[in-house]
Amino acid sequence: MHAFDTRAWARGRAAPRACSVDVSSVVGKEQDPVPRLVNWWDAHQVSLYLAAIALGAVLGLVAPGAAPVLEHAIEPLLMLLLFATFLAVPLIEIGRALRDLRFLGTLLVVDFALVPFVAWGLSRFVANDDGLLLGVLLVLLTPCIDYVIVFTGLAGGARAKLLAAAPLLMLVQILLLPLHLWVFAGRDVVGVIDVAPFLRAFLLLIVVPLAAAAAVQALARRHPVGRATETVMAGAMVPLMVLTLLAVIGSQVAAVGSEMGTLARLLPLYAGFVVLAVAIGYVASRITQLDVPSTRALMFSAATRNSLVVLPLALALPASLALAPLAVVTQTLVELVAMVVMVRLVPALTPSGRER
């Protein structure tokens, strides 16, 4: 994603960052270092994300005692990241996106009718282990509602449409997850699932950041404090994503490493899921004749799962299913690497000049 002028970005149209060169530079003075720094990390963000993943892995393995601190940091970092993401998309654009019934219909069919068959097929490879089976199903049956919006925007996808669909995706997965688990894993499994973490995540990761973003957007129309907040949060997107990736990886990598002998069998399943889900999203978009930004959004939604939201569900399971949360975390580690790759790959698969 290239650097953007905050006001133009808030209208949903990319434009060169107007503040990147101070007026004083015209008369020979040095460029303001703050926008120059923002421009730099905007231009190198994919490399920074890979570095954050690597640094998080090293930190988690070298200093496992830091894991609890990093784990507690994930939720507030995600809230800030989503606040910045929501703030960059005007509410009027969200309302417009909700009227795109073709996109919403395709999204629901892909995420809740087609992808579940992929999840069921892959889960058969670990059907002999209840902990792994439940962990795989929990994470693969639930489409992402948080950082998928950020990665979609990085790839030039219709992030406003995914943002508008996020509450709907959350509600539908809450309603359908018990049914899917009952069909795929058996009725006994449903009895040990507590939906309270789902509702808490919906409140903290959707309602609170979205309400805060709406308030700031309203304030920005009348007061410079609101406009300054928009500018600061737009520039903070990349550092927030870096810190989120570092916290997620650093907090979980040691726990996963302790069971790597068992969890290693999940790596090809999760990698295969990304490939199959991206292909399903692409084919579905061709059938329904979605435009390029919507196609990219659909491909990301199909491949990205709600691991950070379902992890509390998995942690609340009985001790006999202790591998379930580690199976969820393993998917997170695979997915984060896959998302960084997809930021480059998806635009190559769906060039903007392609006619539909």
Image (cartoon, grey):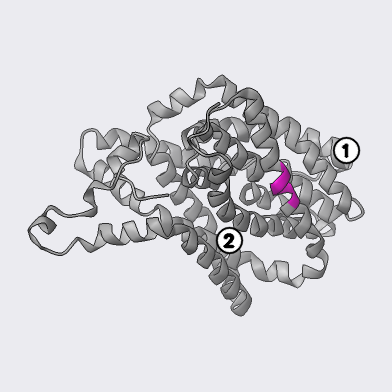
Q: Is residue 321 left or right of residue 90?
A: right
Circle 1 crowding by C-alpha within 10 Å: few under 14, some 14–19, many from 20: few
Amino acid type shown at disc 2: Val
Question: Compared to 163, does 50 lie above or below?
Answer: below
Q: N-terminal of the two: label 1 or label 2?
A: 1
Q: Is 233 covered by the magenta stretch?
A: no
Q: Which residue is mark 1?
A: 187
Amino acid type shown at disc 1: Arg
Q: Which mark is residue 248?
A: 2
Q: Main secondary structure of the magenta part?
A: helix
Q: Residue furthest left?
A: 27
Q: Is 274 covered by the magenta stretch?
A: yes
Question: Compared to 107, does 337 lie above or below?
Answer: below
Residue 45, image quadrant:
bottom left
Q: What range of the chain is rendered magenta?
A: 272-276
Q: Is residue 229 visible?
A: yes
Q: Is residue 22 left or right of residue 71?
A: left
Question: Compared to 200, does 94 lie above or below?
Answer: above
Along the line of sight, the residue nearer the viewer: 38 or 76: 38
